[in-house]
Image (cartoon, coloured by chain):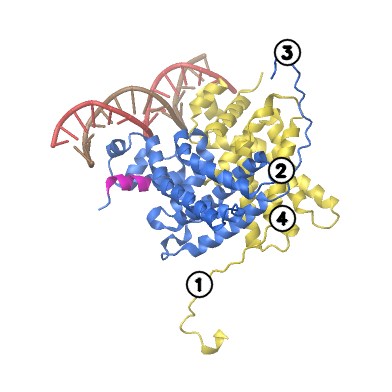
Chain colours: A yellow, B blue, C red, D brown
Amino acid sequence: MIQTKDRILDAAERLFAEQGYSATSLRSIIAAAGVNLAAVHYHFHSKESLLEAVILRRAEPANQERLELLERYQAEAGGRPPALEKVLEAFLIPTFRLACDPSRGGNVFVKLMGRLHAESDLLPGIILAHFGPVLMRFSEALNRALPELPASELLWRGRLAMGTAAQVLRDTPQASLSTSEPVSQEWEHTMRRLISYLCAGFRSPVVPDTRIPEVVPLPETAPVQETK
Amino acid sequence: MIQTKDRILDAAERLFAEQGYSATSLRSIIAAAGVNLAAVHYHFHSKESLLEAVILRRAEPANQERLELLERYQAEAGGRPPALEKVLEAFLIPTFRLACDPSRGGNVFVKLMGRLHAESDLLPGIILAHFGPVLMRFSEALNRALPELPASELLWRGRLAMGTAAQVLRDTPQASLSTSEPVSQEWEHTMRRLISYLCAGFRSPVVPDTRIPEVVPLPETAPVQETK
DNA sequence: GTCTATAACTTGATAGAC
DNA sequence: GTCTATCAAGTTATAGAC
């Protein structure tokens, strides 16, 4: 029989994904899991810690996979930086693999991540800290795949890409979850389409900043010649 | 002195945007607005109706503007369908105009919309109904701007674009709100960059569907002629 | 580890005086 | 229209028996 701890995690994962964090009460979770309220506090101290545990259970191995994939692609490229497509793939494959493996939460978890991405203002920064190293490695890889793009623009587009991906994770229906093992076909296609879309965005022409730069007044004590 | 009703709307708008709908209590709203709890129920029946009122106050005129702009661009194009850039502009200009007019909620409202876009599973469909006509007109315009793109792909990319825009609205800092009137410069630039990014995505190559089509078995009892 | 019981508090909503 | 007072229900969290 499945452990109480896992049943709580499963139920919480599903309900958080469906209704959001604050809209989901611990009581609805224990009802769905068929366990006692006190068990939640025994295993996970608090509601917030429960959310963190729900996330870490999936995100930890997925992030590991992401780094391994990126490293492999870098090795395959033989010294040269891997192409943009490959970098995105290294990030998205583990994501979509989660999405089609029922034993790893299936569609539910990625939906949760898509949600939290918007709700995250009130999320404990601790959670985001777990994604820190991964994000750093990938932004570095993006930088090398798009050397022409100014760093600030790259950062911005990176965030847009995250928003776009979150959108896909959120509203892709939970269709083929009950189907057989390599459900991947549908997801594979979705991922290819997403990557094509994202690459085009990353490579779109940079719009020059035509703003009038703010005039920063020189300190009064500045000598005359310094203005040049 | 400002009416109670408006003070409630203002406070609710800000708090919903900052914390999300379910995480914001009516009591925190009345505290911020400096009004009585009963006043909320007097003016807006319920919490849900309050949210609806908050949205409609801004969305109604913005949607009007969107339709007018689209119509103007169509007239300017003289019979021919306006370019993709123009269609996106017609949708986004009113959005970003909201974002830089302090008297119309400024950054706060667009942030709320960015949030609700993700939280919307539990939102009353009534609200989305108000956007219905606008979305219909624009998807039609998009279709004519991109005649080569299959309808299903266009719909999908349209949703991605909404997700991308929501991301921008959500995390653009509330910087220049306190600055002088035509704050627009910063937003104008942001909008241009967003449009460039989105156009590239819309025009990215379509990934062919390599999935094996599912075999639909014919019903055994079906007579040959009856199907028609 | 799992339960019951309950504390301590917050929530949305309403009735009724002014 | 605006207030006070209050309801009924729901919330997270904990103490203590088994």
Location of the C terminus of chain A by quadrant is bottom right
Where in the figure is residue A203, as x and y percent of width and height?
Answer: 70, 57
Separation of marks 4 and 3 at Cα, in angstroms: 57 Å
Dot 3, crowdedness within 10 Å: few (<14), some or many (≥20)? Answer: few
Q: Which residue was labeled with disc 1? A: A214
In the image, B116 versus D4, the foreground residue is: B116
Question: What chain does mark 1 sit on?
Answer: A
Where in the figure is residue A195, as x and y percent of width and height?
Answer: 71, 46
- What residue range appears in magenta? B3-11
Question: Residues at marks 4 and 3, common chain?
Answer: no
Q: Earlier in the sequence, mark 4 or mark 2?
A: 4
Q: Nearer the viewer, mark 2 or mark 3?
A: 3
Q: Amino acid at mark 1?
A: Glu
Question: Residues at marks 4 and 2, common chain?
Answer: yes
Question: What chain does mark 2 sit on?
Answer: A
Q: Which residue was labeled with disc 3? A: B222
On the rendered structure, is A98 left or right of A21? right
The reply to whether residue B124 is in sight is no
Q: Earlier in the sequence, mark 2 or mark 1?
A: 2
Dot 1 lies on which element? loop
Separation of marks 3 and 1 at Cα, in angstroms: 76 Å
Q: Nearer the viewer, mark 2 or mark 1?
A: 2
Location of the N terminus of chain A by quadrant is top right
Dot 2, crowdedness within 10 Å: few (<14), some or many (≥20)? Answer: many
Q: Which residue was labeled with disc 2? A: A193
Separation of marks 2 and 1 at Cα, in angstroms: 41 Å
Q: Earlier in the sequence, mark 1 or mark 4?
A: 4
Question: Residue, x 47% and y 60% (percent of image)?
Answer: B175
Image height check: is A42 above or below A160? above
Q: Which label belongs to residue A142?
A: 4
